[in-house]
Amino acid sequence: MLKCLKLFWAAAVLVLPVTVFAGDKLGLGRAALPEEIAAWDVDIRPNGAGLPAGSGDALYGEEVFADKCASCHGDFAEGVDNWPVLAGGFGTLGDKDPVKTVGSYWPYLSTVWDYVNRSMPFGEAQSLSADEVYAIVAYMLYSNDLVDEDFVLSDTNFAEFEMHNARGFVVDDRPETEYALWRSEPCMQDCKDRVEITMRASILDVTPDETAAESTEKSEAAEVAAAAPAAEKEAVVSPAVVDEAAASPELVAAGKKVFRKCKACHQVGPKAKSRSGPHLNNILGRGIGTIDGFRYSKAFKKAAEAGQVWDMAQLVSFLANPKKSIKGTKMSFSGLKKEKDIDAIIAYLNAEGA
């Protein structure tokens, strides 16, 4: 009995402080200082609220991106291995395997700035200055052909920029329009007088008569038929012909700017040499994969064996979409989206590399 009393009083002593202070403050900690709150308050809103003062242009952003980001995301924001692709993907959001990038999918520029500022570079989060973040975001927009290379992004013009997919999202109204349809109490008994079979599946054509192989053959035939008009349409597209003699100095100068996307791997001009990519002197009319001493990929070797030539049509096709033009190419560049850029860079290659 005595032992039980001792246990009772010991338990009472332990419970008593909790009872006394349950409704009071514990007196722990202190009020946060203004600078401490500011250190946590770093989120950026779509209207630009929360942005620090600063600016950065796409050209400087290319340098910072190459130094801080390209090891994972590629020199052209095309993604390395399984790291995220940041550029391209336009027109794919309706596909079974959409390419969701900063350019094709993200609706707000503030999300890009906030994420880069808060979490990048990988392993060195929050090591970038505000100007570097502005420059990197400007380069991402440039990589997606949403701005020109001389574009400057700053806290003053940030809210004016509208992303490509800004209007591609809708307000989720399912709580008002759908939830009531399937939240009613289900009937558990005496729900229907009797069940009557009105039609057999075979009569309704729900159960197919054809075999799986026949179905596959029909599906493949349909895909070929659907692809045929598209192929015909592509065939009638005639590329713009850029005559070296007729190319204006302005077009050549514009091509020199576009070539900045290529100079990390290629050279052109009197002192040009092959680097990670072959030199581009005298490319128009030259056989594909024929630069002596350069180690071409299997795709280019195959094109060389087939006798393919860099004529105007082939050059335009490759500049627009390298991976589609020469399947299996190892070149990471995703292509030029604007026809004027393709015309300009061909004019520059003709003028500089003749």
Image (spheres, rainbow, N blue to C red):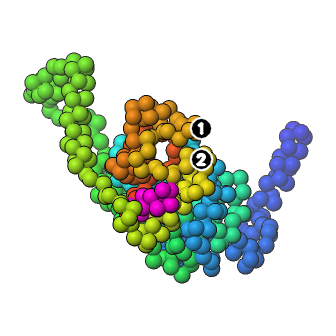
Q: Is residue 38 left or right of residue 235?
A: right
Most foreground residue, 182 or 138: 138
Instruction: Residue at 37% x, 47% y: name it.
Output: 311
Mark 2, other Cα within 10 Å: few <14 / some 14–19 / many ≥20: some
Instruction: Residue at 42% x, 68% y: name it.
Output: 251
Q: Which residues are magenta?
A: 343-354
Disc 2 + disc 1, Cβ < 8 Å: yes
Which x, y percent locates residue 117? Answer: 63, 65
User: Is residue 113 visible to the viewer in this orientation of the structure?
Assistant: no
The residue lying furthest to the bottom in this view is: 156
Instruction: Residue at 59% x, 47% y: name it.
Output: 274
Magenta part, dominant SS: helix
Which x, y percent locates residue 31? Answer: 75, 75
The answer to whether residue 11 is above or below residue 59 is: above
* Secondary-structure class at tag 1: loop
The answer to whether residue 219 is above or below residue 27 is: above
Which x, y percent locates residue 204? Answer: 11, 28
Gap between marks 2 and 1 measured at Cα: 9 Å
The residue labelled by disc 1 is 293
Does the stretch in magenta take in 348?
yes
Label annotation for residue 274: 2
Mark 1, other Cα within 10 Å: few <14 / some 14–19 / many ≥20: few
Q: Amino acid at mark 1?
A: Gly
* Secondary-structure class at tag 2: loop
Label annotation for residue 84: none
Give the tally of numbered discs: 2
